[in-house]
Image (tube, grey):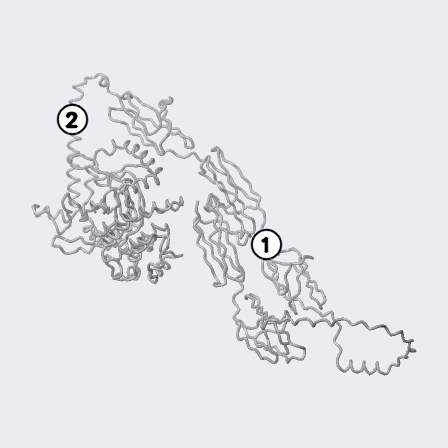
Amino acid sequence: MATLEAKQFGKYYLIEKLAVGGMAEIYKGKTYGVDGFEKLLVVKRILPHCCADKDFITMLVDEAKLSVTLSHANVVQVYDLGKVGDDYFISMEYINGVNLRDIVYRCRERNIKFPDELAAFIMSEVCKGLDYAHRKTDAGGVPLGIVHRDVSPQNILLSYEGEVKLVDFGIAKAAMNISHTMAGILKGKIAYMSPEQALGKTIDYRADIFSTGIVLYESLTLEKLFTGESQFEVLKKIRSTKLDYTKLPESIPDGLRQALAKALAYLPKERYQSAGDMQTDLTRYLYTAYIDFSPQKLATFIKDLFAEEIAEQRERSAMERTFEAKTSSINLAEEALQENIVHREETAPTVLSEESPSITSSEKETTDRSHPSKRIGKRIASVASALVLIAGLGFAYAKFIHPMLIGKTSPTHKVGITGILNISSTPPGAKIFLDGSETELVTPAIIEKLTIGKSYTVKLAKEDFNDIEKTFTATSDEPVILDISLETEKGSIELNSDPPGANIFVNNEPTHLTTPATIEDMALNTDIKLTLEKSDFKEYSQTLKLTSASPQTLVVKLSPVEKVGTILVTSSPSGADVFLNGRDTGLVTPAELPGITVGERQIVRLNKAGFEPKTETVTLKSASDITVPFELKSSLPPPVSAEQDTKKAKTAKKTAIPTPAPAPKPPTPTPVVEPTPAPAPVQKTSQEEIAFGPDAAPASLTVSSQPPEAEVFINAEYKGTTPLTITNIRPGSVRLLINKEGQARFSQKIQLNPGENKDIGTIRLGELYGIITVKSTPSRARITLDGEDIRAKTPVTIKKVRRDKDHTLRVELEGYSPWEQTFDMSDAEEKKFDVILEE
């Protein structure tokens, strides 16, 4: 709840600060008419850096001259543009309700669909206001050419009774031309620009129609139409995106989709040619699709959605009544400081400037009007003279008349007159004690029947806040007004760590302190999340609650982070099975062994059929990648040459072998005839896997790569580096593997025919590793990638993310729903994630 502190500003009392923007502070205020009636309004006090820009003020005055002429049920009325001291201000109609952005955000937070009929009704009412302004003419019937330029959810106000009003006509033009605040003013508003506005071209009323279409889209989908990681990306999308009926979500009803497509046409000539035409289509859809629609549905929807805010407003209204004594009259000297530059009268606005002095004024009066400081000085002088006269009369009364009336006796008071205490507090609800006794009242309250002239001590007590006492004396029957701000009771934590020097975060926000340190002003009976971070140590996090203002001591033992690296294992030839510390990894060379702890000895062994096993002992000295190459030795006997084979045969012929005596012939058995078995069927092979006989002519294969010097393997056998021509390849189906450190592998099965010389061209190897950047709102969220804690908080950049497989990213923050997404990087070397966490 905003703090209530009534203060006079010219002829207004500023009751409550409602918001602060890039151009102005916005207050709820009130003033008094000639007959003493009270009027609530909104006062926008222009920020000093804007007031200092003469071009901005000139444009603001020009636009205000047009704005005060607008009088329509769907347009917020502007009353005055003026100046108090060095501060410029705009006063306008007060709307008791919320803006459309609040409604969209609330629906999104609670996962509530914004009813289509309400979105159509609201934008239909907005179109009414726009059409009125676009058609506005001067007294001679010449169009004024008014364009809003900033139709956005923030500028569409909805009262709790269901009224729809458009605010800030023309002010956007001045705001967008002030260099000091360009970034702040455009933030969040670029997304509602028309293409011609984004391109810096001249715009007309049809730009407002395009912006109205964007707002309607956001109301129907609860999503922004144009988004991007930066304002320039949003501008680029607006400038280049062309929408039509087919590109709009099918979830939008057909009638609304047609109206939306026409409003969002890229070329102004293809859009509605007036806001009135768009309003006609929206109204036709509304009462065709929802025959029994009533604007009261909007009021009911808003009241249900903002029930808590309405209850708080009632409580605020009760508190505002405590200021009535303070604000029941206007200080004339303060009012005299106000200079009206543009003013709305009952019938028509009056522009007060050098060029428009009063017709009945004398020449001297005209001169004063052209010099506001002189005119104000005269008013102050007049008021001061009156005050001096009143003071003199008061002194004479006190000196001469009053003693004659009362004589020399002690002061007495009229019988039956008692004092009144009007007491309030921020926050309200504090128990009230008077002279040590509990009154059974809570703030805000009025205590009556106080003795005139007696001194009282009042104490306020509220849980989680420090008790506070005030002394006052009732001197008359005029109420004594006390408005007391309660200070939250706070505690402190003396925090240390082993080792010291850890950065301290409270509720995920940096304190800019390092251990040892004392954290002051800690709220009591509230969950507090403490986080310690130190390089090379694991993050420590603990949630605690202080129940006493007494200092608490906490000492944390930080655990060192296990540093890890990666071992890249290669072999010649490749295709060897990889074992790590006696465990079969299931990988074959070339292979990557991630997650190796720095400083620990690792035993790597390679096994390959036909080669001797080989073992290497590896110890990582830092959290980096190292490559361990293996040269494998064949375990087979050396092949016998053809010459050695011929000599062996000749030697065998010279060796005499005795012939044994013939054995006696056995009796001839009776022949048995058996059926001849059918020949086994020949199994056909696919064209890609045709097997050729041993006499088939060998084939050759030529391969290049980008980047070059990549290792080439045929059927897991190392052949050399690219560019390369491999000869004497047995024809048939072969497996080609191209590998280069830091690049994604290329693997393909190739069919070679006998005698074929095949050139497969240049193989482009992609980067093996990519980069992802993760941001979150709120920040300092925990990141896990493929189930592993990254040990860093958002925003974070993660390097060496493999591009040849899918990954799962998860973002978590206490008090928010986790966010998770599976992605691959086959199409990009860098990906960015901007995550908005939901409570």
Residue 372, above or below 684: above
Taking 270 as reference, is 658 left or right? right
Q: Which residue is mark 1?
A: 563
Residue 676, above or below 138: below
Q: Secondary structure at mark 1?
A: loop
Q: In x, y percent, where is residue 171?
A: 25, 51
Q: Earlier in the sequence, mark 1 or mark 2?
A: 2
Give the amino acid at mark 1: Lys
Residue 47 in view (yes/no): no
Residue 235 in view (yes/no): yes
Q: Which residue is mark 2?
A: 396
Quarter of image, res 420: top left
Q: In x, y percent, where is residue 385?
A: 15, 36
Give the amino acid at mark 2: Ala
Q: In x, y percent, where is residue 82?
A: 21, 46
Residue 489, above or below 359: above
Q: Nearer the viewer, mark 1 or mark 2?
A: 1
Q: Secondary structure at mark 2?
A: helix
